[in-house]
Image (tube, helix red, strand yellow):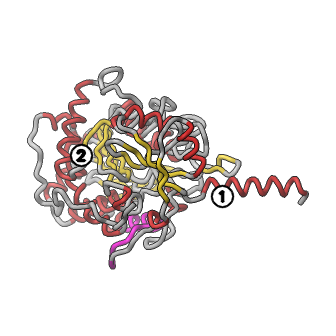
């Protein structure tokens, strides 16, 4: 190897190390309103936590300098490796690897073959299956004939958000077991609807980030596209086509919110698009993320409300009513996505903008980075599932006609083990 080649290789290795290095700082930035928060995202930063008067982003010395030079008064706080740790708190409490999730879904289809079928949304960059299951008491032909409504639940657009995998996986297991046990309300819903559950939309990123159920993650967010020059990953939740590249995303491949070279550039988002496009009876969608304890609905790419420039104002009332009702169970805050900050190219904007699907994002527990953030520990799994079981059933109940929610009494779902207001604020004892 000649000296020039050796020098190029060293530069590439250095860039790669920089792109994959752990953050050095938790950077606090005063941001008392959504407009200021949106300007921060326009600089290419993923905002990791929003408080009433400030936000936090993860970064290094260069980010502290960039934000300071952009006019922000920043306070860098030392990043602690324990923010990346999965904590285990007893037998049977684990986070699942990608392979574990696939096996669990295969087991479900084997145990309940008349109810559950295993499918694949498509392949990832690294050729992993985006495994999905269909749950319904009807065959596909019968569902087509009866014009049965379709609902979809998705997890893990962002690799480090492992709790967003566990909740839809547990929901799939719950639905199948309750149906088989003779739960009349579950049977009625599943005999008249088609349910699709895809726990991991980003299998490559999830696999890269997942070291082990009681070990450290890597704070990885994006997929694993090789962008070249040591840079990896596209933010899948900035890659959808509706409103793509209209704010709150970045054209910089090194950015955590890199939107990709064009809309639907990634095989993962292409797979979701192809499936949803093929389901004209899909009425409802729920995409799980972490963290912050929020129930979000469109628009994310605009401060406009549904019906002002696009969409139907009648749908806004449906979104607001359903979000409010669900928040009574999980104690999350219901709001339009852009009340946080502008973010374009996201899943729910596209689902509603392109197909008028009533689509929500749940930002799951915990509430704060200091309570566990992206790695809240295994003791978060069951209470978070319980807190969100009734909201998930609520969406399933109204999938036949979401506008029913405007006039009907909220179901009790008293048959569930769910508990209202599950305390989830202390999954991990962290302090700054």
Residue 53 among those drawn in magenta: no
Q: List x then y, in percent, for residue 396.
A: 23, 47
Mark 1 or mark 2, whichever is nearer to me: 1
Q: Residue furthest bottom?
A: 91
The mark that comes first in sequence, 1 or 2, is: 1
Q: Is residue 285 visible?
A: no
What is the secondary structure assignment of the residue under circle 2?
A: helix
Categorize mark 2 by other alpha carbons within 10 Å: few (<14), some (14-19), many (20+): many
- Relative to residue 273, is residue 1 drawn left or right? right
Q: Residue furthest top?
A: 309
Residue bearing mark 1: 17
Range drawn in magenta: 90-107
- Foreground residue among 220 and 367: 367
Q: List x then y, in percent, for residue 311.
A: 32, 25
Residue bearing mark 2: 395
Q: Is residue 101 above or below residue 273?
A: below
Q: Quadrant location of residue 117?
A: bottom left
């Amino acid at each position: 190897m000649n000296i020039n080649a050796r020098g190029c290789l060293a530069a590439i290795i250095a860039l790669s190390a920089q792109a994959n290095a752990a953050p050095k700082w938790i950077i606090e930035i005063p941001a008392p309103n959504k407009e200021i928060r949106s300007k921060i995202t326009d600089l290419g930063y993923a905002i990791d936590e929003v408080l009433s008067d400030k936000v936090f982003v993860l970064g290094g010395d260069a980010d502290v300098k960039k934000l300071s030079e952009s006019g922000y008064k920043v306070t860098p706080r030392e990043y602690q490796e324990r923010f990346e740790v999965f904590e285990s708190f007893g037998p049977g409490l684990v986070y699942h690897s990608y392979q574990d999730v696939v096996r669990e879904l295969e087991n479900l289809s084997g145990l309940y073959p008349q109810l559950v079928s295993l499918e694949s949304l498509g392949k990832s960059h690294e050729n992993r299956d985006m495994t999905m299951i269909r749950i319904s008491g009807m065959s596909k032909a019968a569902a087509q004939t009866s014009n049965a409504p379709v609902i979809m639940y998705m997890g893990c657009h962002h690799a480090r958000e492992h709790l967003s995998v566990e909740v839809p996986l547990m929901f799939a297991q719950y639905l199948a077991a309750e149906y088989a046990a003779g739960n009349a309300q579950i049977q009625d819903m599943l005999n008249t609807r088609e349910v699709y559950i895809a726990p991991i939309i980003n299998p490559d990123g999830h696999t890269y980030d997942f070291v082990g159920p009681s070990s450290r993650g890597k704070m990885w967010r994006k997929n694993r596209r090789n962008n070249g020059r040591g840079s990896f990953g596209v933010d899948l939740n900035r890659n959808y086509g509706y409103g793509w590249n209209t704010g709150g995303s970045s054209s910089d491949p090194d950015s955590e919110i890199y939107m990709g070279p064009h809309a639907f550039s990634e095989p993962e988002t292409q797979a979701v698009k192809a499936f949803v496009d093929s389901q004209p009876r899909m009425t409802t969608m729920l995409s799980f993320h972490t963290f912050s304890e929020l129930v979000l609905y469109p628009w994310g790419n605009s401060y406009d409300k549904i019906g002002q420039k696009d969409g139907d104002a009648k749908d806004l009332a449906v979104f607001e009513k359903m979000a409010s009702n669900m928040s009574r169970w999980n104690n999350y805050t219901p709001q339009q996505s852009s009340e946080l900050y502008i973010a374009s190219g996201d899943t729910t904007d596209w689902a509603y903008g392109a197909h008028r699907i009533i689509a929500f994002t749940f930002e799951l527990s915990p509430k704060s980075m200091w309570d566990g953030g992206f790695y809240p520990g295994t003791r978060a799994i069951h209470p978070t599932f319980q807190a969100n079981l009734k909201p998930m059933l609520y969406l399933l109940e109204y999938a036949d006609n979401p506008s029913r929610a405007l006039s009907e009494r909220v179901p009790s779902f008293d048959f569930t083990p769910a508990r209202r207001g599950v305390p989830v604020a202390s999954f991990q004892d962290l302090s700054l």
